[in-house]
Amino acid sequence: MTSRNKLNCILLVDDDPDDNFLHELVIKESSAEAKVVVAENGEHAWQYLSNPQRPDFWKPSVIFLDINMPRMNGFEFLELFKTLPESTRAATKVVVLTTSSHPQDQEKVSSIYQEAEYRTKPLTSEILFDVLGSESPRFSAR
């Protein structure tokens, strides 16, 4: 993803409504002008991404992905995500955002989708700035 890409949508994939609320708040308070879409698990996120013709579809520039979720976890989602066309993957930054700091989880993420970043929850303005800083000219960290 290059700085020429417009930040238009952030996809939050997490089964915890409190985390989603907090992460949306951090995004809004940080002046990142982007639509925020929430998926409650990997399956819902995959359904969203695999149906770009739907009227409410916004192509995400960034996906913040939890690992431990019901129905389809973050690892399973990454396996499907890497099957998308290269042009789609290249335009979307994937950030695994999880409570797990286990090296095995980090290694597994890297082995499935090497381009993914790995961060520990919660999302903070510092993490957001680090991930989006060059992507959004209107972004300002507090």
Image (tube, grey):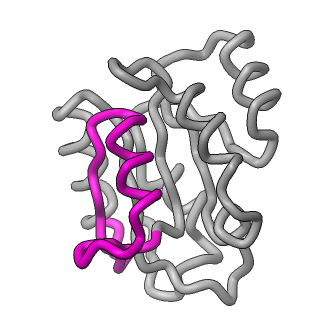
- Residue 124 position, x and y percent, is 42, 47
- Residue 47 position, x and y percent, is 37, 49
State which region is magenta: 30-59
138 vs 21: above or below: below
**In what quadrant of the picture does the C terminus appear?**
bottom left
67 vs 62: above or below: above
Question: Can you tell which quarter of the image residue 87 is in?
Answer: bottom right
**In what quadrant of the picture does the N terminus appear?**
bottom right
Please name the residue shown 44% across and 75% down the image. Answer: 140
Assess whether residue 41 is covered by the magenta stretch: yes
- Residue 73 position, x and y percent, is 46, 24
Question: Can you tell which quarter of the image residue 125 is in?
Answer: bottom left
Q: Nearer the viewer, residue 14 or 53?
A: 53
Q: Number of callouts in the render?
A: 0
Q: Which of 16 and 54 is in front in this view?
A: 54
Q: Would residue 42 appear left or right of 101 to someone viewing this image?
A: left
Q: Nearer the viewer, residue 21 or 30?
A: 21
Please name the residue shown 73% across and 67% down the image. Answer: 90
Please name the residue shown 65% across and 71% down the image. Answer: 91
49 vs 112: above or below: below
Q: Would residue 37 appear left or right of 122 to someone viewing this image?
A: left
Assess whether residue 40 is covered by the magenta stretch: yes
Please name the residue shown 26% across and 54% down the image. Answer: 24
Q: Nearer the viewer, residue 113 or 17?
A: 113
- Residue 66 position, x and y percent, is 45, 31
